[in-house]
Amino acid sequence: RARCGHSAMSLMTTPWLVLLAGLPRTGKSTVAEYLASAHGFTRVCSDEVRDDYRINPWSGDPRENLVHMATHLRSLEPLLMGENVVVDSTAMFVGQRRVLFDTHIFNPASGALPALTVRRALVLLEASDEVIEQRYRDIGRRLENRAFYRERFHPVTEMPGVTVLRYRNDCAADLESIKQQMPRHLGLSFQPG
């Protein structure tokens, strides 16, 4: 998992929890890596949770149902320390998005579940079916589950207290535009220190 140095700015401002959602091969990991390298975000990835525990999402492994909870738990530590976090996850279902945005933590001294104060953004990345298929071919794989994803991916709707951003990522120019626009939309002006 990408660990970036603390920015002095992150200690003085409310941290961001940015959830990148979208179908596979829409550029979530690329954008997450950009936010980590250019803006000091800590990157948390649901695919890395699967890799760490050798979970194949198509094998029927019952632990697949726990992947988003484990991803959520990995995001809490840097948020607690005042760092910005970007979560790289398909986040197909509204329930998964709610889990990933939950910032309640258990305080053993009081037994309370206070919520961390964070700014939340849900960033939906989209690309055409043709572009997604080409990206799979480029890595030597076939897209076998496109219908599964397209049919089951819950539409992104407004969520209380969450900034929703939508970007199209069909080509390199789109990706460069996202890298220019997203920091402005999130009010990111600092560089990692």
Image (cartoon, rainbow, N blue to C red):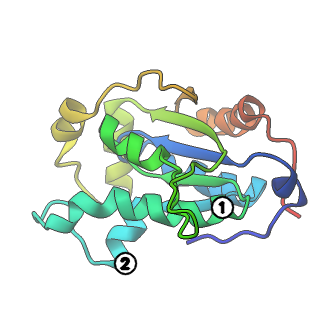
Give the residue number, with chain letter if any, for mark 1.
80
| Most distant residue in the front direction | 110
Q: How many marks?
A: 2
Q: Position of residue 36 (x, y in %)?
A: 68, 59
Q: Where is residue 11, by image quadrant? A: bottom right
Q: Is residue 117 above or below residue 82?
A: above
User: Is residue 83 found left or right of 53 in the rendered image?
Assistant: right
Residue at position x 22%, y 62% from top? Answer: 64
Residue in the foreground of this view, choosing between 4 and 8: 8
**Above or below, 94 relative to 99:** above
Query: How far is disc 1 from disc 2 in space, using C-alphas?
Result: 23 Å
**Nearer-N-terminus badge (1/2):** 2
Furthest toward the left, the residue is: 60
Position of residue 129 measured from the top left corner of the image (x, y, whole percent): 31, 32
Q: Nearer the viewer, residue 84 or 39?
A: 84
Label 1–label 2 contact, CB within 8 A: no
Q: Which residue is mark 2?
A: 52
Residue 73 to residue 89: above or below: below
User: What amino acid type should be assigned to the residue bearing mark 1?
Assistant: Leu
Taking the spot 89% from the left edge, 64% from the top edge, the residue there is: 193
Residue type at mark 2 is Asp
**In this view of the protein, can residue 170 be seen by the observer?**
no
